[in-house]
Amino acid sequence: MFAKITAAAHAAPQNVVSNDKLSTIMDTSDEWIYSRTGIKNRHISTGENTSDLAIEVARKILDQKNLDASELDFIIVATITPDSMMPSTAARVQGAIGATNAFAYDLVAACSGFVFALSTAEKLIQAGQKKGLVIGAEVFSKILDWSDRSTAVLFGDGAGGVLLENTGRKPLVLAETLRTDGLRGDKLRSGLTKLKSPFVEGRSEEMALTMDGRAIFDFAVRDVPKNIAQTIEKAELTSDDIDYFILHQANSRILDKMAKKLGANRDKFLQNMAEYGNTSAASIPLLLSESLENGKLSLETNQKLVLTGFGGGLTWGTMIIQL
Ligand code: ACO
């Protein structure tokens, strides 16, 4: 038996903030944001923390499958905006839903987090675990520097996740290539902690997110398409064999360039960043879940999908999966 995605769900805070609304609180415009990113709205939490969104996703999945939480073997939450480092967001989910037999942990790989987590979870299933939740969840709004218009307009809050079970009759993963380049890590940073003890002089400061936008754009359009092409080749497929490309929702211009470089039909690149902005580790499962809901994707087909994350670390990675 192989790992299979048997359900998916998503959640986002109710509060929708449009580009026009942002332009009332900072020096920006709908025209600037939309033309450069494809983003129109983002959901910004006024109450929920990251675990609340992840718990909502977990509960929706359990309801869909009429599954008792005690049947889960593991829960992985990909996030860089945990409620706390300890307990982890995954532990909060485990406790809240009563997954008494599950081990749970967070995985930190920024916008590649869901892909890295799904890859890990598939190995857990191959190693004998039966059922697990893989969730990407972020309340990104709490780590943004709201006085920095160059980053504040890009991100949003949300969560998505899947149930993975050992009930597949064919391999879920046709090929995968996961990468990290820590030497370029300072191009995108958040949550820097500094030494702070009676033995250290000076005061520590908390740092909000910082990003070298140009460098990240270049990384996304240079390294990432190569990674996708290499993985498609590894699977002995061509881009024509891929039904849909479900890529991290950072920016629609990045998707334009990727499609061009891969010689792939742009219509196959699904997107929802217009509604959610960049939700980091949540963006891929959120799009996957929405696309299942609106019928673009179906779990009972053999659709072949490219899932690609890219972001802080730097991290990037592609999985080609068959539903
Ligand atoms: N509204 C209006 N003007 C703005 C804004 C804003 N929100 N932000 C910046 N500007 C101004 C700048 O100050 C600059 O003005 P200047 O020329 O007078 O100095 C001008 O707009 C152009 O700024 P650039 O940064 O050069 O704009 P660029 O065309 O490069 O677009 C962007 C910026 C959209 C951030 C682009 O670099 C990009 O998409 N980078 C990739 C970022 C990304 O996707 N990050 C996330 C991926 S990783 C992850 O998901 C964690």
Image (spheres, rainbow, N blue to C red):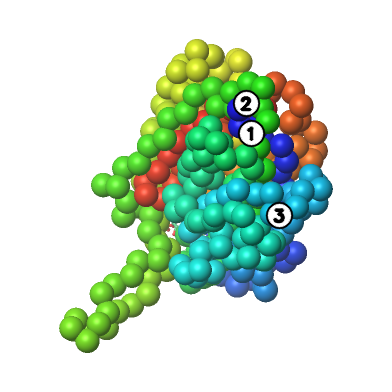
Q: Earlier in the sequence, mark 3 or mark 2?
A: 2
Q: Quadrant of the C terminus?
A: top right
Q: Are marks 1 and 2 in contact (CB under 8 Å)?
A: yes
| Kind of element beneath mark 1 | strand
| Kind of element beneath mark 2 | loop
Q: Distance of mark 1 from mark 2, alpha carbons? A: 6 Å
Q: Are marks 3 and 2 in contact (CB under 8 Å)?
A: no
Horizontal side of residue 24 vs 9, given as left or right:
left
Return the mark for residue 69. Answer: 3
Categorize mark 1 by other alpha carbons within 10 Å: few (<14), some (14-19), many (20+): many
Categorize mark 3 by other alpha carbons within 10 Å: few (<14), some (14-19), many (20+): many
Q: Considering only vertical position in the picture, is 164 above or below 147?
A: above
Q: Distance of mark 1 from mark 3, alpha carbons? A: 16 Å
Identify the residue under disc 1.
166
Q: Residue at x 50, y 56 (%)?
A: 105
Q: Residue at x 43, y 30 (%)?
A: 177
Q: Residue at x 29, y 72 (%)?
A: 194
Horizontal side of residue 269 vs 68, given as left or right:
left
Identify the residue under disc 2.
1
